Image (tube, helix red, strand yellow):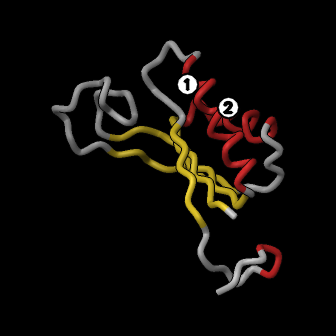
Amino acid sequence: MKLLLITAIKAFEPDIKDLLESAAVTKYSYRDVTGYNGDAQESIIGNWFAQENNETDSVLFYAIVNKEIAQEVLALSDAFNDKQASPSQVHVAILHIEASNHPHLNIVR
């Protein structure tokens, strides 16, 4: 199983929900977060949040999914990012779950 993490600016929240639905992610959590970039000298192209100020209204989604669904979310987010005129992007990270006490995950501790 994989832990799927998705971060983006708050404006992309509805798009991420659509993306998750398209990838058959039926259970997930999300919350509003504040993105922070402490490097005020960094160029806007290299800035994770694509703005010149240091703090940005952002959103964090997380879900436990199988490998195939995680890869589908990654592919859909790449396609979404390719269509954006804005330098802001949807960022996806996929982490392996080594252990869990959740009985439905079938992971040995």
Instruction: Give the structural element (helix, strand or loop) at label 2.
Output: helix
Count of labels in the image: 2
Which of pointers 1 and 2 lies earlier in the amino acid sequence?
2
Name which residue type carries label 2. Leu
- Is disc 1 in contact with disc 2, using a CB cutoff of under 8 Å? no
Where is residue 97? Give x, y as percent. Answer: 61, 69
Q: Residue furthest top?
A: 85
Residue 97: mark: none
| Quarter occupied by the C terminus | bottom right
Left or right of 19: which side holds 85? left
Where is residue 60? Give x, y as percent. Answer: 56, 49
Q: What residue appears at the point 76 percent right and 33 percent down from the top-left corner?
A: 18
- Measured along the vertical axis of the image, is residue 99 above or below residue 91? below
- Measured along the vertical axis of the image, is residue 86 above or below residue 58? above
Q: What residue appears at the point 57 percent right and 46 percent down from the top-left corner?
A: 6
Where is residue 99? Give x, y as percent. Answer: 62, 79
Residue 81: mark: 1
Name the residue carrying label 2. Answer: 76
Where is residue 19? Give x, y as percent. Answer: 72, 35
Q: Nearer the viewer, residue 64 or 16?
A: 64
Left or right of 26: which side holds 86? left
For disc 1, the neighbor class at 10 Å (few under 14, some 14 to 19, many from 20) is some
For disc 2, the neighbor class at 10 Å (few under 14, some 14 to 19, many from 20) is some
Q: What residue appears at the point 78 percent right and 77 percent down from the top-left corner?
A: 106
Instruction: Give the structural element (helix, strand or loop) at label 1.
Output: helix
Alpha-carbon span between mark 1 and mark 2 = 9 Å
Left or right of 51: which side holds 16? right
Name which residue type carries label 1. Asn
| Quarter occupied by the N terminus | bottom right
Q: What residue appears at the point 62 percent right and 24 percent down from the top-left corner?
A: 80
